[in-house]
């Protein structure tokens, strides 16, 4: 659950989004992703926790044009919708600053994208299919480099244009290169990426090249 002062937000595995009063648990508003957007439950349910940003709450939903949806955090009124994904994945949306502007990074089961958090307008999108749709660990930004990883040894470093209008895959990992973690979110420091990879092996790699240290 995400607590934001007097309100609490929680998303259930069957796509029920709740806004409750923190003090009482009384329902303020709710959404049903399956009913509202005509979706089926993902393989392992919905699990990307809601992101409160200013006066809105942003959720990974899935579907045609509704991969990510923002709601008014007090009323539940839809503010904007963006992107398309057959597999919504399980990765929460994250906001970092890049190019002097706040960027919402979304990694669903089929692609990584940068979106304007206030309007939902995409800045760029890079196709990158997660194994079994298992986009879980949140993308991590360092300078112009965005690192992602997922199941079956897959990882990649995206190089983002300084004006944030485009991005491309600089390198992709495999079982010998990169860091293919599943459930955890990686940590970047001083040009190195740290995390738990395949079969529970703790690893350190070079962010610029993916080479293991």
Image (spheres, rainbow, N blue to C red):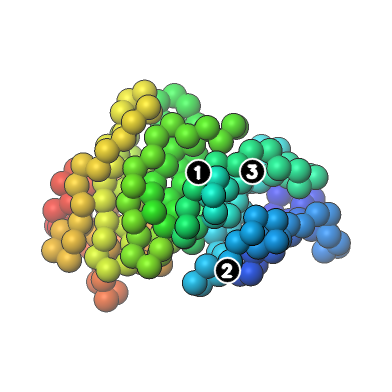
Residue at x 31%, y 35% (from the top left corner): 167
Residue at x 20%, y 56% (from the top left corner): 173
Q: Could you tell me which quadrant the N terminus lies in?
A: bottom right
Mark with earlier residue (1, 2): 2
The percent position of residue 126, horizontal first and vertical second, equals: 34, 42
Residue at x 26%, y 51% (from the top left corner): 156
Foreground mark, 1 or 3, reads 1
> From the viewer's perspective, is residue 5 above or below residue 198?
above
Left or right: where 151 falls relative to 104: left
**Label 2 vs label 3: CA separation?**
20 Å
Q: Which residue is mark 2?
A: 41
Q: Which mark is residue 70?
A: 3
To which quarter of the image does residue 72 belong?
A: top right
> From the viewer's perspective, is residue 57 above or below residue 48?
above
Q: Which mark is residue 1?
A: none
The percent position of residue 34, horizontal first and vertical second, equals: 65, 62
Left or right: where 73 falls relative to 193: right
Helix, strand or loop at mark 3: strand
To which quarter of the image does residue 9 belong?
A: bottom right
To which quarter of the image does residue 183 belong?
A: bottom left
Residue 174 visible in the current orientation = yes
Q: Which mark is residue 83?
A: 1
Return the residue nearer the eye: 37 or 31. Answer: 37
Number of residues whose C-alpha sits closer than 10 Å to that of mark 1, classed few (under 14), some (14–19) or many (20 or more): many
Number of residues whose C-alpha sits closer than 10 Å to that of mark 2, classed few (under 14), some (14–19) or many (20 or more): some
Residue at x 55%, y 64% (from the top left corner): 47
Helix, strand or loop at mark 2: loop
The percent position of residue 201, horizontal first and vertical second, equals: 25, 71
Number of residues whose C-alpha sits closer than 10 Å to that of mark 3, classed few (under 14), some (14–19) or many (20 or more): many
Contact? badges 1 and 2 (CB < 8 Å):
no
Foreground mark, 2 or 3, reads 2
């Amino acid at each position: 659950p995400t607590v934001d002062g007097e309100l609490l937000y929680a998303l259930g595995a069957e796509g029920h989004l709740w806004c409750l009063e923190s003090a009482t648990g009384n329902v303020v508003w709710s959404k049903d992703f399956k009913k509202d957007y005509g979706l089926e439950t993902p393989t392992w349910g919905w699990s990307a926790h809601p992101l409160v940003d200013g006066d809105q709450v942003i959720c990974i939903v899935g579907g045609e044009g509704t991969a990510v949806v923002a709601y008014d955090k007090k009323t539940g009124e839809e503010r904007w919708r963006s992107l398309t994904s057959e597999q919504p994945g399980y990765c929460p949306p994250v906001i970092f600053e890049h190019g002097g502007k706040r960027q919402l990074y979304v990694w669903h089961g089929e692609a990584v994208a940068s979106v304007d958090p206030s309007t939902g307008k995409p800045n760029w999108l890079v196709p990158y299919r997660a194994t079994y749709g298992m986009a879980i660990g949140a993308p991590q930004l360092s300078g112009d480099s965005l690192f992602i990883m997922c199941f079956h040894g897959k990882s990649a470093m995206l190089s983002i244009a300084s004006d944030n209008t485009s991005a491309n895959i600089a390198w992709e990992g495999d079982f010998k290169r990169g860091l293919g973690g599943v459930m955890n979110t990686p940590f970047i420091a001083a040009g190195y990426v740290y995390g738990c990879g395949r079969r529970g092996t703790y690893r350190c790699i070079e962010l610029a090249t993916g080479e293991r240290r």
